[in-house]
Amino acid sequence: MTAAPAAPAPLDGPVVRPPPGARLRRLARRLSFALLAGVLLLLFLFPFWWMVTASLKLPRDVSTFPPALLFTPNLDQYRAALSEPAFWWQTLNSLVVALGALALGLLLGLPAAYSVARFRLRIVPLTVLVVRMIPGVVFMLPLFLVYRQLGLLDTHAGLIVAHLIITLPLAIWIMMGFFEDVPVEVEQAALIDGCTRWGVFWRVALPLSLPGMSVTAILAFITSWNDLVFVLILGGNDTRTLPASVLSYMGFDTLNFAGIAASATLLSAPVVLLSVVAQRWLVGGLTVGAVK
Amino acid sequence: MTSVDLAAEAAADLAHPPLRGPRRARLFAWLMAGPASLVMLAIMVYPLTNLLLLSLRDYDGASVTAYQWVGLANYEAMLADPRFWAALRRTLAYCLLSVTASLALGTLMAFVVNRRFRGVTVLRTVFILPMVAMPVASALVFEAMMNPNQGILNQMLEAAGLPPYTWLAHPGSALLSLVVLEVWMGAPFVMLIVLAGLQSMPQEPLEAARIDGATPLQALWFVTLPMLRSALATAVLFKLIDTLKQFATIWVLTEGGPLRSTETLYVYGYALAFQFFDVGYGAAILMALLVLVLFVSLLWMRVRERAWV
Amino acid sequence: MNVRTSSAALAAALAAAVPAAAQDAFDWRQHEGATVEALMPEGPFLDAALPVIEEFEAATGITVELEQLPEAQAWDKIRVEMQAGSDEIDLYIGQIDRFGAQFSANGWYEDLLPFIENPALTSPEFDWEDFREPSRTVSTIGGQVVGIPIDRPGGPVLVYRRDLLEANGIAVPTTLEELEAAARAIHEATGIPGMVLRGSGAPATSQFANVLHEFGGRWEDAAGNPTVNTREAVAAFDWWGRMLRETGNPNATTFGFPEVVSEFVSGNAAFGMDGALAVPAVINDPATSQVAGEVGYMAIPNGPGGPAVRETDPCRTIGPFAVSINPFSEDKEAAWLLAQWLVSKDAQVDLLLTGRLVARASAAESDRFLSDPAVTAEQEYWDAVLEASSFCYPTVGNAPPSITDVGRAREIVGQVIVASILGQDVQAAADQAQAELEALKASQ
């Protein structure tokens, strides 16, 4: 979009030569662009770089300056964290809850999003927006009380339902736009061919919006995975998830920077990997449907 | 029509729902949307009603029977409470600074990654990371980096011969430091939205402008940005809501200090309810926050309609 | 960890030594098959409890389901459970001054006195009188025993870097004035900050209380009115802020106890004073500490008030951690059995050996303690800590005790501390705090 203007293609007529110095200008532009990109890259990468390197050092070395760029990595923190059996079933819990919330969110949200896209049920996006506006703390005590009554505390099912607060609005919001993008003619053709409305949804709209579903799935998974608030209040021993373990490094006695860094790295690792793999979809597909 | 437009239409249209299409179609539509809507309403209604009722009581958090109804007294006290107004100002300042900076930085990032060059995928991936990392974990990492004595940021400043910055330690700099974290986490989202807008933009106007002799800067200002209006507006709306509702990172880093300089409405309400055992008043503050978010969102959607359509 | 092995070994030895008849005198298996749900914050008391729980389960046939959470989350969870009148927790470890007044007023504590006095439920080994009188007093609110105290927050112990003092020819200070001079001197000579203290507002008030006392200041007068803006109090606030601001730590407003410990053990301070810091296990931790072996301990030096201050009115420190039972629980008796084990004489000696003062008097007098080589190696520490605790008593609430809203009171006082560190007008800040405290007290 903002590339340096290329020399105009040769047309009939006298050959137009690029004005003198244009090559130098182009080089300067490229360099300043590279510089800008480099600075931005550094700014955004720096905290992650610090986090990973800190996790590989002895706690006492974390704050020495200048930070050793080359050092023998010390895997103590990781060894300690990964050898705790707690770590593994916490990961399992996180997985179960995130996948469950994702599945349920898609199950309920996809039909709803389709409704909005095709039938203009405008109350739904409004509700979604309002749900998104509510501060998390408002949910805490009421949900705790209701869950206690229903015996849902410290259950995976309970957490999955609670995480719907996160995944359902997300699914509807994103898929609304994608369903709108499905060409109406294709759907109408199917209808004429004798397909039921449900059939159109199931066999036409859904397959054509798979990219959108991927985006939704990834974002919903990540947000549910990262959640802390619901898990702490509505969960318990059986359902302890990974994020809660990060907090245990803000300990009674010391601030273990290295431990915090290791814990944060382990926590973000799956999410980061997911983003790396899916970045093409995320970048290309996140709001292509929703923004026109 | 963007999703935001739909919501805005719904807001305006609530009194007169349009009847369109055959009845069977409407029935199908409601069946499809029904379960999700019910779930969302159910999840929303009880907590909101609970909050409202709490705010009408003088309640110290003890067992259910030990409270008194005081009607609007909490709200009256709130309007007369200088600490409330200070928190409101800070919430708005935090929001304004974060949204503006995220918008600027995110748009810049979008332009940078919108081109094809070697390593652009790496760049894009790195740029997304702050958005998907766990906020509390990111906050802890920033806290360690911003540590005035042992943190790497001040160490680098000193190595460069500059005086150390007070970061989270001084009332004058704490809020700004929090804004830095918020922008680091929030700009990627803006980038994604603007990038989507850039990629679906028609090319002709830009080429026409160039042929007419516009400099890149002029092309940017007069052609590209106006066409990104819709994307930018969506980004702003989401960022407004998110920053007004920000809590976890602020609480973890400063709990509202030093000297309350980072005490937003959410922080104040939370402290009241969970540290000072003044749950009724805390609920009133949180209601005020909710109203603020609603108000700002509706205001923005209005402005958008009037000025930018 | 030697805590676990010594505890297990001792239990085995005891079991073998005690005659069978005496062992059967108290029926530990009376609630066999029950389940006790316990909640404990992460930290040394949890660590000490783990082996005890194992033995308890074996000896009583009761299953213990333990939930452990980081401290702040544990407090939140306990509060939420009490608000909801929930029976999810039977027993928990909490801090008496954090919850005390509030919980007691709401009826959220189970009175343990009837349990203690019931010979069917309480083993003769329990011996309530073995707990020091101040510990018993602080654990009794409104005539109810709200928790069995575990530790005995000691008086203020100052830690100092012997090597830095020697290298710069500075004598160990004997008064707070000398301490200030020494801190400044070391900072000027070496660039290392002279003193590290908490500074982040409310969390600092508990440590500040000791200095307040040494200056002759008090939280409130005999009638219960707050007195935080008296000359002595302002002098104390001023001293605290000066010690941080002018000896190298002007940014201490972000320092809670983790930061204080971190700064000192990484070598960034000549002096330090904090309940979480003055523990040999922390100072000598090889993973984090760069100052092991160079540290000296002493009880807080006298302030301008002189030694007389301590005689007329003992200083107050924070309240202890204690084992409490949920009044809404359905398994109180089984929980009470667990409670006894958690604070048994042996468990207390084990805890004492890790360097933390405990509530039972017998622990420090026990042979096991006195003959432990680790104890004799850290003689200076034990002398300091025992001396400091001789003139300081635990209390409920470390801001004006008669204000029940401890959280808000601490927050108000904390602002004065922060203002002092930032170099603002301390008298004005103290006056403001005084006004706010008076309003708070009036609205009680």
Image (cartoon, rainbow, N blue to C red):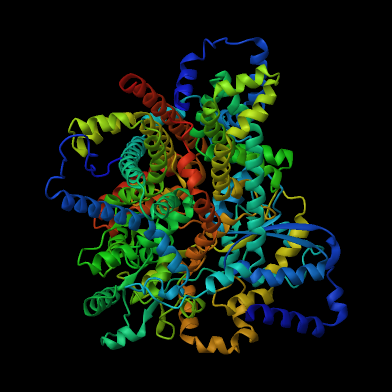
x and y, in percent, of residue B34 in the image: 65, 24
Q: Quadrant of the C terminus of chain A?
A: top left
Q: Nearer the viewer, residue C188 or C151?
A: C188
Residue A264 visible (yes or no): yes
Q: Quadrant of residue B297?
A: top left
x and y, in percent, of residue B250 in the image: 41, 48
Q: Quadrant of the N terminus of chain A?
A: top left
In the shown orientation, is residue A289 left or right of residue B114? right
x and y, in percent, of residue A156 in the image: 70, 47
Residue appearing at x 66%, y 19% in the figure? A191
Number of numbered callouts drawn:
0
x and y, in percent, of residue C157 in the image: 43, 74
Q: List the single residue furthest toward the left.
A: A20
Work out whether A253 lies above or below A120.
Answer: below
In the shown orientation, is residue B303 left or right of residue C74? left
Q: List the single residue furthest toward the front.
A: A13
Q: Nearer the viewer, residue B295 or B297?
A: B297
Residue appearing at x 39%, y 34% in the figure? B197
Q: Nearer the viewer, residue B244 or C29?
A: B244
Work out whether B155 lies above or below C282.
Answer: above
Residue C399 visible (yes or no): no
Q: Quadrant of residue B141?
A: bottom left
Work out whether C151 lies above or below A3.
Answer: below
Q: Quadrant of residue C56?
A: bottom right
